Image: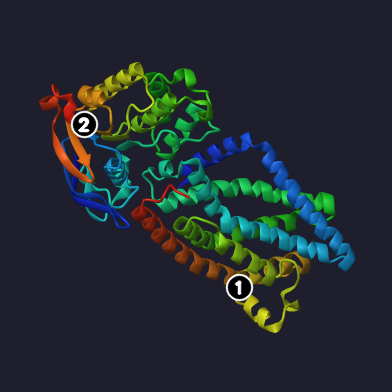
Amino acid sequence: MISIKNLSKTFGTKKVLADINIDIEKGAIVALTGPNGAGKTTLLKILSCLILPSIGTAEINGVNCITNRTSCLKNTGIALNSEYGFYAQLTVKENLQFFCRLYETDCTKIAEMLELLSLAEFKNTKFLFCSAGTKQKLTLARALIKNPAVILIDELSKSLDNTSAENIYNILKNINSINNTTILFVTHNINEILNLSTHYFILKEGTIISEGKTDAVKNNPGFFNP
Amino acid sequence: MPLKIILAFLIRDFKIEKAYRLHFLVKLATVGFQFAVFFFLGKMVNENYFPFVFTGLLFSKIFEFTLSGITDSIRQEQHWGTLESLLLCPKGHQRILFSMFASKTVLFFFEFLAYILIGVFFFGISLSLLKIFYLVLFWLVVIFSFYGLGLLNASYVLVFKRGDPAGWLISTLTDLLSGVYFPSNLLPLWLVKISYLLPTTYALAFIRQLLFDGTLNPGYLLIVFFSGFILYIAGTACLKLALNSCKKNGTLGSY
C-alpha cells in the first residue's frame, strides 16, 4: 500500500534522509518515531507530495507520488501541522466546508464528522479562537472526511488530553477495521505507539534503525527511546 | 474551467472579506484621494487631462492587480500557513492557483466598478452605459492578457521569497512609459521607442481611442493578445520550475 524505495533527501549539504526503504501493507497501522530532526516529517511531506526526494521513489497504492501527484493525493487523507492550515476568520464548520469543496468530497458528511470527533459544539467557533486540541481534531477531520484509503498523520495526539487521545485512537482503529484503511502516523508518544500501531519504524539521523511488529516489543516500552 | 474550485475560493474569500469590511472602504477612499489629486492637477493643465489620466489610472489598477494578484494570494496563504493545505488538494497546482486568482478577480471586479462610479459621481467623468461596458470588456482583456506576467511575478516570489522588486519595476516602468499619466510621445525619442515594445502601451492606446474617439483599433488588440499568449506560455513554464524548486528545497510554505 505504501512503498518507499531507496529514498534519500538532501537539503543543501545536509542529508536528512538516507536510503530509506519502507513497505507497508494495506490495513496496517504504522507508527513512525524517532528523535527530533530524524527526518520523520520530511518523509511524511514527501508522501504528501509537498517535498521532492533527491533520489528514490515513494508510492501509495501503486501510484508514484513523485510523478503522479494528483492520483496519489486522491485517496490519501493528510493531517499535517494543526496550528496553521486553516483560516482564522472562518468557523470550524466553514473551514471544513471550504476544504470539502476544494477536495471535491461530500460536504454532507461534515455534520457526521464533527459529531464523531466531538467538534459539534465548536462548529460555529472561529478557528482563531479554537484551542490547540480542537485545531488538532479539525486537522484530523479534514483528513478523514475524504474517506481515504491511506491516512498520513503528523504528531497525532499533540495538544490532546488523554481522554481525547484515547477517543481518537478508537476512531482510527474503528476506521481501520471497517475500511481496512492504512494509517501511518508520526509520533513521540510511546503510549500511542503501543495502543494504536500494529507496526513501527524508528528513524534516527535520517536512517531506519529499527522496524517490526509492535506486539513483539509491547513488554519493553523503553525500546522506543533510542 | 475549474468552476467548483473557483466557487469554493469565492465563498471563502467573501466570508473573509466580510470580516475586514473597513479594509475595502479604506481602499476606495485611497483611490478617491488619488483621483482627487489628478482632478485638481487637471484643472491646472486642461479640461481633457483628467479623463485622460482617469483612464490611465483605471488601467494601472487593473494591471497592478493582474501583476500582483497571484503573488499576493500566495503570500497571504504562506502568511496564514494554509498554502500547503491548499496544495494537498488532488488537483494541478496551476489549477489551484488559477482558481485562487479567479476568485480574487471576481471580488476585484466590484472594486473596479466602484472606481468607475467614483470617477463618474465625484469627479464628473462622462461615461455612457456603452462606454462603461467597453471598460468592463477592457478589464477582462487586460486581466487575461497579462495573467502570464502575474505567473512570472509569482514564480519570482516563490523562489526568492523576499520583496517584489520585479513586480515593482514592471509596474513603475509601465506607469512611466505606457502613457498612464501623460502621453508617451512626450518622452525622449529613445524612451518612445522602448514604449512601443510594451504591450501595455497598445492596451492603453486602444481603450483611449475607443472611449474618446469612438474608433476601434483591432491591430492594437492583436498585439496585446499575442504578447499575452507569449507571457502565458513563459509564465506557466516558470511557475512549474519555481514550484519544483520549492518542493526540492522544502520551502513551499515558507516566506
Element type where label 2 sits in the image: loop
Residue B214 placement, left or right of A164: right
In terms of depth relative to the viewer, which is nearer, B4 or A31? A31
Residue A125 x/y as whole percent? 52, 24
The answer to whether marks 1 and 2 mark residues whose Cβ atoms lie closer than 8 Å is no
Q: Residue at x 64, y 37 (%)?
A: B20
- The single residue placed furthest to the bottom in the displayed view is B189
- The single residue placed furthest to the top in the displayed view is A163
Residue under label 2: A225
Reply above or below: B55 against B178. above
In terms of depth relative to the viewer, which is nearer, A23 or A225? A225
Q: CA distance from mark 1 to mark 2?
A: 64 Å
Going by the numbered disc 2, the residue's amino acid type is Asn
Q: Are marks 1 and 2 on the same chain?
A: no
Name the image quarter holding residue A225.
Answer: top left
Residue under label 1: B198
Residue A161 placement, left or right of B130: left
Tell me the subunit letter for badge 2. A
Going by the numbered disc 1, the residue's amino acid type is Leu
